[in-house]
Amino acid sequence: LAKTTQPISMDSYEGQEVNITCSHNNIATNDYITWYQQFPSQGPRFIIQGYKTKVTNEVASLFIPADRKSSTLSLPRVSLSDTAVYYCLVGDEGDTGRRALTFGSGTRLQVQP
Amino acid sequence: GAVVSQHPSWVICKSGTSVKIECRSLDFQATTMFWYRQFPKQSLMLMATSNEGSKATYEQGVEKDKFLINHASLTLSTLTVTSAHPEDSSFYICSAPGQDDYGYTFGSGTRLTVV
């Protein structure tokens, strides 16, 4: 499984756009990039998944450059409720169900008023 | 979407006692369940994988006799922490391949405090 590296923590203010970058230099051809969000004392929650270029949903955008060695999760106009830990995961979607997700250290985002 | 119901959400027990944590898949069948443990300000660490009708697979360093896993049906997996000690205090989370966008659904977690 490709190892991921992301900042340990980030601070932001309400209304700002937050970009969290994840490095995954050893990503394999079949690997997808997935981001999860975890609030204190809760299980992780799926945010977004992508393979290349850009993916956008109602919650966030995911930017993936052509070499796919990194990815950036973009949260538009964050609010206090976006304070959480964000995990970047890389894995083969074909392994879904057969292999557990491996979580890295995650990025602790603190949003200030 | 798919839901995994985890109970209890928190529990306090005395040293030496056992605690059972349940995870149920609602509206879908989970032949596999993954169990994680998370210490404060740390990431999730996989403990074991349970499979319906067969023995669980434990990660290196996890005592199978201490953390008993039972997956007796397609919708229920249980983790029993036996002879609990204060160092077992942690946040335990289950996860099942479900029907989410990425195929994994997580329980809400169980905060175990051993006193």
Image (cartoon, grey):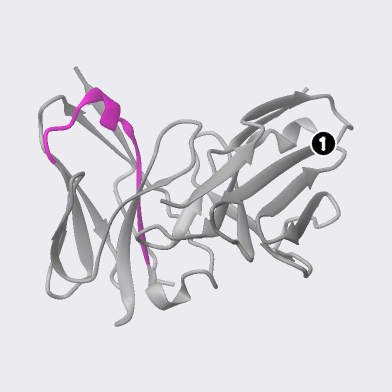
Q: Residue at (11%, 37%) from the top-left corner?
A: A17
Left/right placement of residue B108 relative to residue B73 reads left
Kind of residue at badge 1: Ala
Q: x, y (%) of residue A78?
A: 17, 32
The quadrant in which the C terminus of chain B is found is top right
Q: Which residues are magenta?
A: A76-90
**How many tags in the picture?**
1
Q: Tell me, yes or no, if residue A27 can be seen here.
A: no
Q: Nearer the viewer, residue B28 or B52?
A: B28
Left/right placement of residue B64 relative to residue A84 reads right
Check the image and report above or below for B24 versus A67: above
Q: Tell me, yes or no, if residue B12 can be seen here.
A: yes
> Which chain hosts label 1?
B
Q: Nearer the viewer, residue B52 or A110?
A: B52
What residue is disc 1 on? B84
Q: Residue at (55%, 73%) from the top-left corner?
A: A98
Check the image and report above or below for A31 versus B62: below
Q: x, y (%) of residue B41?
A: 48, 35
Q: x, y (%) of residue B3?
A: 50, 47
Furthest residue toward top: A113
Circle 1 — which element?
Answer: loop
Q: Residue at (72%, 58%) from the top-left corner?
A: B61
Q: x, y (%) of residue A94?
A: 42, 78
Q: Residue at (67%, 32%) from the top-left corner?
A: B8
Furthest residue toward front: B27
**Residue A68 painted magenta:** no
